[in-house]
Amino acid sequence: EDRYEEVDENEKVPHYEQKKWEQDQMSSAVFRFGAKNREDEQKAYDLILENQIEFVNPINISGTPGIEDEDKKPQLTEKQKRKMNIEETKKSLPIYKYRDELLRAIEDHQVLIIEGETGSGKTTQIPQYLHEAGYTKDKKKIGCTQPRRVAAMSVAARVAEEMSIKLGNEVGYSIRFEDCTSERTIIKYMTDGTLHREFLSEPDLESYSVMIIDEAHERTLHTDILFGLVKDIARFRKDLKLLISSATLDAAKFSEFFDDAPIFRIPGRRFPVNIYYSQAPEADYVSACVQTILQIHVTQPLGDCLVFLTGQEEIETCHELLQERTKKLGSLVKELIVLPVYANLPTDMQAKIFERTPPNARKVVLATNIAETSLTIDNIIYVIDPGFCKQNSYNPRTSMETLTIVPISKASANQRAGRAGRVAAGKCFRLYTAWVYKNELEDNPVPEIQRVNLGNVVLILKALGINNIINFDFLDPPPHESLVIALEQLYALGALNHHGDLTKLGRRMAELPVDPMMSKMLLASEKYKCSEEIVSISAMLNVNSSIFYRPKDKQIHADTARKNFHVPGGDHLMLLNVYNQWAETDFSIQWCYENFIQYRSMKRARDVRDQLVNLLGRVEVDLVSNISDNVNIRKAITAGFFYHVAKLSKGGSYKTVKHNQTVEIHPSSSLREALPRWVIYHELVFTTKEYMRQTTEIESKWLLEVAPHYYKSKELEDSTNTKMPKTVGKANSELG
Ligand code: CDP
Ligand code: MG
């Protein structure tokens, strides 16, 4: 009777019934967390609850300490699950019951929308079902797109494990700068951006029998464009099956877009989740998280905890704070296993999040919103939701792209809460007030296509022969202005001619899986005979996480080490210097350690560099080195990034040439004191001010050399000139 799948859906795991569980904690005056005596326990409890956060609705968790009774905490499913082998686990997933029905629906319809609660088994199971049903005969592949790299990798690893094969053989993944597939691969997970690139080499997706556009509800830019592309393909490839899979309620919208394709709903299982709100707004949600985690740890029965933060930095801060505080508590509390999850997480760390929590310990997963729907971590009972996420947004008027922390939507908040109710009744602690939830959060997030720079996708669409972008079949069209700006930028970069058609340069640019400006820089390195250097710089710029390591207790040492890498010219050249010095040591770990450099970031830079070298080979750029002449290197950078030029203004601040916006050199820059007259920057980041990150000194006359159709000499003389260069009218003609 204790078999998971035999229990009635509605009565599943009655042991964890909400009411009883609450009662247990409320009625108990005893708490144990490994402390030797009652006094110690009280001490730990006081320590943690000193600055406690008050939650409301329906009960205040900080009221009475909870009981830790081995039999009563939600361990049963955990135990049950441990006993299960993979086969049984697969059978326990909600989708399993619908396997045959689903396969039949796929057989009957070319396009099918699949909707099912997160964790029901869509991503991991459907490709396997299709494989078993014969869709991989004749060497045809099943493709499945994911909006996030980590999800593609970890899901592929999981499926390979379920099928007992080595990852990269029959099951593989392909993400930007990393291809883990082989000739034998028949189930292929990839990012949505990767599929865009595949369209370039295989416009009809001939090698696929099924394409699954997964996590469709995330509405990433690439997924949104894919909708239009696959819809078009399905018209003339009647043998291609198309599955659009979504976790939430957008199914009807997808169905309508795909000519009223049928919707297959997988009924989910969800246990009740009690939601608690902060009584007052939190000033610092990272420390509020730490506090709440510890509060949960000492007052709530065992069960894992998932915390939503916005990015790697926040996750690391939270991790450090937690370590500090638990160290102080020592053996007074039970073991707390803290695991980070974010986009650039190294592979070996990724596997850890799925490992079972040892008995008598609690796992705390600190994740970005990747854990909202893309990744399902089993046995989460508690969710902490500060209510924010990082979002890309692009202001077409200032042509500035910024990554900002914004409040999530109600839909996201509910997805997050739902993560607590997969295996038992759970609790979600929202670090915002009920009023904020009701009155300030939007219902749904804005699709990415409506808020980002479209340069990249417009270039790909052009390369696919889609000339009239404005008439492209968008699920939700982007703002007209964004399209115009993207076309203008591509024209200025030389990727489009004045008819709006792709140039030879543009075709080569489209081959490189990087931003058009970087693409242009890479290709310009050919002319300036410094491709070896530019490819290293590009690789270093592509490593999102920090290269330099700055531990709190050794900041002075770290800063000195960093200064040792400074070279005349600026940050791009400094990055090159770091890479070259590291390469000279034969990529030594020890060297990184001694120089306060993050080995992991460097390793990634090296991988990215290898990939870029391959890709440059494909577009026939020879690798030549010109280290002695950094003018040429800087000219090549300028040839790509001439949009990002700023001129020194009063008081050490700068004005961007195009929009006359006040910006400053980032405090970490090697040019922070030099303050050259003209600089080029890689990106703008907004923290307390608008900062330019990765800045390099240039000469204004180079701009006339590298972008004569964009800069007029008059503009460069007059610093107050804010007029738009004369490209608008021409690029606009394509838009009619
Ligand atoms: O796609 P959907 O959200 O419907 O579910 P899924 O990702 O296929 O997850 C099904 C099950 O596989 C969950 O219980 C996950 O915890 C598990 N899984 C895993 O153990 N390891 C992974 N890397 C991915 C999923
Ligand atoms: Mg999924």
Image (spheres, rainbow, N blue to C red):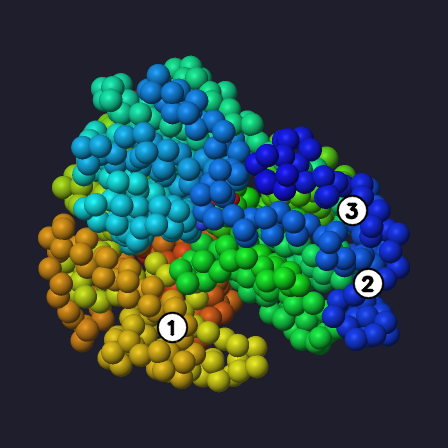
Please tell me whether residue 242 is drawn above or below residue 187 in the rendered image. above
Residue occupying image coordinates x 76% and y 41%: 18
Residue occupying image coordinates x 70% and y 76%: 330
Asked if the residues shown at circle 1 and circle 3 are in contact, with their CB atoms under 8 angstroms apart, the answer is: no
What kind of residue is marked 2? Phe
- Find residue 57 and report its horizontal and vertical position in percent: 81, 42
Please tell me whether residue 411 is drawn above or below residue 367 in the rendered image. above
The 10 Å Cα crowd at callout 1, few under 14, some 14 to 19, many 20 or more, is many
Question: Which residue has dot 1 on it?
Answer: 599
Question: Which residue has dot 2 on it?
Answer: 31
In this rendering, does residue 249 appear at all? yes
> Where is residue 104, by image quadrant?
top left
What kind of residue is marked 3? Trp
Q: Secondary structure at mark 1?
A: helix
Residue occupying image coordinates x 36% and y 54%: 644
Question: Which residue has dot 3 on it?
Answer: 21
- Find residue 240 and report its horizontal and vertical position in percent: 27, 25
In this rendering, does residue 670 appear at all? no
For the residues marked 2 and 1, what is the alpha-carbon distance in whole angstroms?
43 Å
Question: In the visual, does 312 lie left or right of 191?
Answer: right
Asked if the residues shown at circle 3 and circle 2 are in contact, with their CB atoms under 8 angstroms apart, the answer is: no
Asked if the residues shown at circle 2 and circle 1 are in contact, with their CB atoms under 8 angstroms apart, the answer is: no
Q: Quadrant of the C terminus?
A: top left
Viewer-nearest residue: 77 or 539: 77
Sequence-first disc among 3 and 2: 3
- Find residue 677 and report its horizontal and vertical position in percent: 37, 66
Quick check: is the Cβ at mark 2 less than 8 Å away from ligand 1?
no
Q: Quadrant of the N terminus?
A: top right
Residue occupying image coordinates x 57% and y 31%: 268
Question: In the visual, does 651 lie left or right of 495?
Answer: right
Q: Secondary structure at mark 2?
A: loop
